[in-house]
């Protein structure tokens, strides 16, 4: 593999409330005059001190074979957390509101009782929840059988790809991967970002992002790109905080993707010193349709209630 430079980075931060005091961060690099290490073998050690006095130490290192089960389990658990948010998102779709409202009105008119329509709506919601959970589980299993089936071959077998884990308390608490983009030559795709729930809010995700950005600089990539779903609000805020900018929203090109309005947001970031991005955000007229539909349905419901 040739001669590798090993460098160590230590960062100490104070956490107040929900925001990090970036001005109080002290960054020390050993063995390099660069602001961030550029070695292919990168190890970052962090110590975070909260106002409660609890010290949390973790480090970012490259993936090892013994991390296999922990990585896959963390990904599956993290993705499963989005099922409730996905259900709420689907319930906000105009056609779903229309179906539920029409069902309630028809049953109320025919039965002359509130019990039957309430039970019917409850049953429909329960069935919808189970159906969404089933499809989401299928998506998770698909990912586990794709690039996460053989992590070493997919991410560690070539020079342009890599997989990192965050280690704390002698266990894996975070993951991130990077490999060349399939759509644009020279771009690096950030993938499989995940942090254990009980270790969130400590800057681990940001540190993992920095590892990918450093890797992109070393590889001479033109940009770091990533995709997020519409239900990943916390992830989008974190990516924007570290410098990523959204340049396009796409609806998943499948039947259930269009029905549920599953939107994929595409982000891009240029490491320090690179030229400004030449990407332009594409405006989609179809994105305004759901809001218009919800307004129309709300008006119809108000009129219906007024008539009662």
Image (cartoon, rainbow, N blue to C red):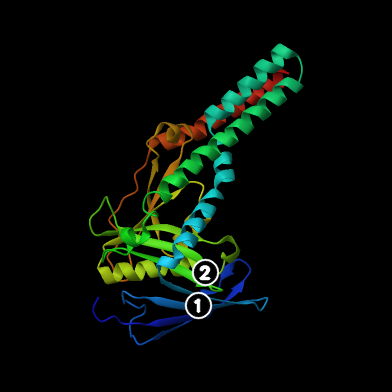
Above or below, 233 relative to 262: below
* Disc 2 to disc 1, C-alpha distance: 9 Å
Q: Residues within 10 Å of mark 2 (few under 14, many from 20)?
A: some
Q: How many marks?
A: 2
SS for dot 1 = strand
Question: Where, quadrant-wise, is the C terminus in this rendering?
Answer: top right
Residue 268 found in image quarter: bottom left
**Residue 153 on image: x %, y %:** 31, 60
Judging depth in this view, the residue of 287 and 7 nearest the camera is 7
Q: Residue at x 53, y 72 (%)?
A: 168
| Mark 2–mark 1 CB contact (< 8 Å) | yes
Q: Residue at x 68, y 17 (%)?
A: 107
Residue 215 found in image quarter: bottom left
**Residue 159 on image: x %, y %:** 26, 66
Task: Classify residue 146 as left or right of residue 121.
Answer: left
Q: Nearer the viewer, mark 2 or mark 1?
A: 1
Upstream in sequence: badge 2 or badge 1: 1
User: Residue lying farthest top?
Assistant: 110
**Residue 13 on image: x %, y %:** 55, 77
User: Residue lying farthest front?
Assistant: 66
SS for dot 2 = loop
Q: Which residue is mark 1?
A: 46
**Residue 202 on image: x %, y %:** 56, 69
Q: Residues within 10 Å of mark 1 (few under 14, many from 20)?
A: many
Q: Which residue is mark 2?
A: 203
């Amino acid at each position: 593999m040739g001669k590798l430079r090993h460098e160590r980075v230590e960062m100490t931060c104070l956490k107040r409330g929900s925001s990090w005091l970036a001005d109080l961060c002290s960054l020390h690099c050993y063995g390099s005059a660069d602001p961030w290490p550029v070695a292919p073998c990168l190890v970052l050690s962090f110590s975070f001190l909260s106002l409660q006095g609890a010290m949390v130490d973790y480090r970012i290192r490259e993936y090892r074979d013994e991390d296999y089960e922990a990585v896959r389990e963390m990904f599956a658990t993290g993705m499963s957390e989005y099922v409730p948010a996905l259900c709420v998102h689907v319930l906000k779709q105009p056609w779903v509101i229309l179906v539920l409202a029409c069902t309630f009105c028809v049953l109320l008119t025919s039965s002359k009782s509130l019990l039957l329509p309430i039970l019917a709506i409850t049953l429909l919601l329960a069935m919808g929840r189970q159906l969404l959970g089933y499809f989401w589980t299928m998506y998770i299993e698909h990912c586990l059988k794709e690039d996460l089936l053989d992590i070493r071959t997919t991410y560690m077998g070539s020079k342009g790809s890599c997989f990192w884990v965050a280690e704390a308390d002698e266990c894996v608490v975070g993951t991130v991967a990077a490999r060349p983009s399939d759509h644009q030559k020279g771009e690096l795709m950030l993938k499989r970002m995940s942090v254990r729930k009980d270790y969130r809010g400590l800057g681990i995700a940001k540190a993992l992002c920095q590892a990918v950005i450093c890797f992109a600089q070393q590889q001479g990539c033109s940009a770091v790109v990533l995709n997020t779903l519409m239900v990943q609000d916390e992830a989008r805020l974190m990516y924007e905080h570290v410098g990523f900018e959204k340049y396009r929203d796409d609806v998943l090109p499948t039947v259930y993707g269009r029905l549920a309005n599953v939107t994929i947001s595409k982000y891009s970031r240029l490491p320090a010193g690179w030229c400004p991005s030449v990407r332009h955000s594409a405006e989609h007229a179809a994105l305004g349709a759901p809001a218009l539909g919800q307004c129309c349905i709300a008006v119809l419901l108000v009129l219906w209630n007024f008539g009662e």
